[in-house]
Structures are given as structure tokens and as C-alpha cells.
Amino acid sequence: MTLLEKSHNISPDGDARLRKQGYERSGIGLLERQRQACTYWAPHLERNKRCLLDIAQKLRAEGGPGGTLVILGAGRLLDVPWETLFPQFERVVLYDADSSIVPFVERLFSSVRHTPFPPPRFEIGDLTGTVVDTAAWAGHTIERSTSPEQAATALLEGFQRGGAECQPWAGSHADLRMVVSTNLMSQLGYFPRAYIQREFRTRFKQGFADRTAAAEALECYFDRVRARHVSDIAAQKNAWAFLSSDIETITYELEGEQKDLSKVEAPPGGGAFLDDTGGAQFHWPVKITGRSDPLHGQKIRNLWPAGTPLDPPQRWIWHIVPQGLEKRYTTCGRTHVVEAWTKRSAEQPRLAS
Ligand SMILES: C[S@@+](CC[C@H](N)C(=O)[O-])C[C@H]1O[C@@H](n2cnc3c(N)ncnc32)[C@H](O)[C@@H]1O
């Protein structure tokens, strides 16, 4: 076991299932995109960071540094203003299923001459406590089944039974002062779904999505996981919380002269914004070619338990793939509508120390 593994919760060989299901090094693609399209991404990252800085300011007004900050799906901290936020806590715990974030984040901190906060602790594994198990079970079920029909029937029953228990992080920090879930919620089903689809296709040479009842049961299971994610965050009564997620995906095709945005700097705002009515507007003439819902019809507003002390949500557009940036996106681009929520702490302000 290396020193790195000893000081964090990383098993020496890692959980092989995380690698098999595609979590390992998954954030590298995201980082690559961000680097190539940094002027398009900047307004989104700034907006997300500003929301977190607003909470940081309120925490400062509540008292000196203290308590624990938990970041769920921390990734490479692209959208977290860690330089300002982390010094406000005694402990910072970063949860993610991708162990390759550890050396990245450690390098990030070492690039700063003096980091006025203790090194964060990493918790590498499935923060939901169930989705990786469910996907692994589905993989075994597919392997054991002798026909696609038999597999689909067993999967349907299994996914319908699948519960979403209290997520392990939620009961682990007695002095939790802030919890952050940024750009994670819609991702909770992403890797398990992709893994199940891959295993099904490899075994039976046909798509899992065509098994509509089983595929829908899987999505309803992910609904329960997301609902639990929000209710576990809401249950941290004495902590501030920030939750942001994409709630709609919009693809577009450029209609004018301009056909490749990867060669031009983004205009202010990243070239896409929401107007006063919440409609998507673009800097260039575009045709909207598709819309999809990464939350399967769930509305975050309805997932917060009644009485949760919330600020009004904010929305903005993240121009995630400008047209022309990637091979798959030579003739279209992709934007996400992001929704962000702040939950206030119920705790009385602490005396300044
Ligand atoms: C879209 S990324 C966002 C990362 C970060 N907010 C950023 O911008 O750098 C989502 C992150 O959640 C992690 N993740 C997804 N499902 C997870 C799970 N079940 N348990 C732990 N981490 C998970 C992924 O590994 C990834 O790092």
C-alpha cells in the first residue's frame, strides 16, 4: 500500500468494478473538453463558483473556520473555488468514484505555494452505496442468462426491487458544515446504464434499450437514487448545501456562415444564454435539433422535502460542446441548461473565534 493510499480511503488495487464500469479516469474526457473549449465553459464555471462563494461569504459571517466540508462527485474541482472555500473548514472530504482525481488534485494544490488549509481527505468509491452494486449484479445476471428475454425479465424484477438506501456519506460527518453536489446528479445513472447496455450488447448482440420495460425499470431505479441524493442533502439540517445539475440538454446546428466554433473565441456569456422567459438564445443563427431530459422527468424542486430552507433556484446555460470541437460534433453543438440550489443551514450563527 502506498502512502497516498494509506492517507486516503483508496484500496491498493482499487475496486475492480469501478474500473470495469468506466469510472476510472472518466473525468479525463471532461477535463479535455474544458481545456479545448475554455472560453465557452468559463461563464458556466464562473456562475457555479459564484454561487459557492456566496455561501462562503455567509459562512464567514457565521464565524471562523471550522467543521467539515464535503464535496460529492468532486472530480477535478473545475467548478469549485477551492482556494477561497477550503480555508474556511477544519476538514475537507472529497468523494468520487474515479481514483485518478487524487494525483490530479494533489498536483493542483502543490502548484500553489502556500495552501492555508489541511490536505483534503479522499473517499474513493460509490457515494450512493448502491449503483455500482446494482450494475455489477446486472452484469452477472446478463452473463448467467441464456437468452435476452430471460435476462430482460430478471433485470426488470431486480431493478423494480432496487432500493436507494441512505447514502453512506450522509451519516459520516458529525460536524458537517457544508455539502456540495455539483454537476453530479444527472451523472449518477450514467456509468451504470452505459455498463449494463455494453454488457447486454456484448452478450446478446442487441440493444438493452429495446427491452423497454427493463430499461424503464432501470431509469425508475435511478429516479429513486436521485431522490435519495437530494433528501440526504436536505437531511443535513445544520449544514449549508449547494446542488447544481443539468436539467435539459439542447443540441443545435449553426445556420449562417459560421460552421466551426472551435476556431473562434466564445462571445461574452459563452454564446448561449437563457432569456427572461427561460428560453435558450444563441449568439449565432441556429436551428435547435434536439432536446432531452437527463433527469427522466424529475423536477429537483419536487425532490426537496417540504420545509427545506431554500433560496430561489438559479438557471443558466453551459455551452459544453461548441459545434466543430469534436468529431461527433462537426455538424452540431451541445448545451446544457443548469439549475442550482442553495439550502441554508438551520444552525444559529457561531461566535467568531
Ligand atoms: C461530471 S463530473 C463533475 C466533476 C466536478 N464537479 C468538476 O466539474 O470537476 C461528475 C463526477 O462524479 C463522479 N461520480 C459519478 N457517479 C458517482 C458515484 N456513484 N459515486 C462517486 N462519484 C461519482 C464522476 O467520477 C465524476 O468525477
Image (spheres, grey):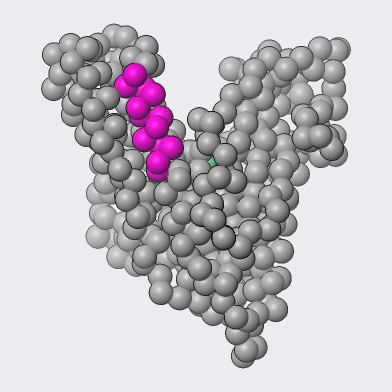
User: Quick one: 307 or 211, which is closer to the camera?
Assistant: 307
Residue 88 image position (x, y, % from top left): 60, 74
Q: Which residues are magenta?
A: 213-225
Q: Position of residue 178 (x, y in %)?
A: 54, 66
Q: Going 58% across and 52% down the picture, which residue do you hit?
A: 243
Q: Main secondary structure of the magenta part?
A: helix
Residue plotted at (32% across, 21% down): 214
Name the residue: 69% across, 63% down.
53
Residue at far top of view = 205
Q: Is residue 62 left or right of residue 100?
A: right
Res. 174 visible in picture: yes
Is 195 within the magenta?
A: no
User: Which of the pair 323/232 is nearer the observer?
Assistant: 232
| Image coords of residue 217 (percent x, y) | 35, 27
- Residue 198, percent from left and from top: 33, 21
Question: Which quarter of the image is occupied by the C terminus?
Answer: bottom right
Q: Is residue 11 above or below residue 89?
A: above
Q: Residue furthest front?
A: 306
* Residue 221 included in the magenta stretch of the image: yes
For residue 191, say whether it is visible: no
The residue positioned 50% from the left and 76% from the top of the image is: 67
On-image quarter of the N terminus: bottom left
Count how many numbered circles sit on residues in the image.
Answer: 0
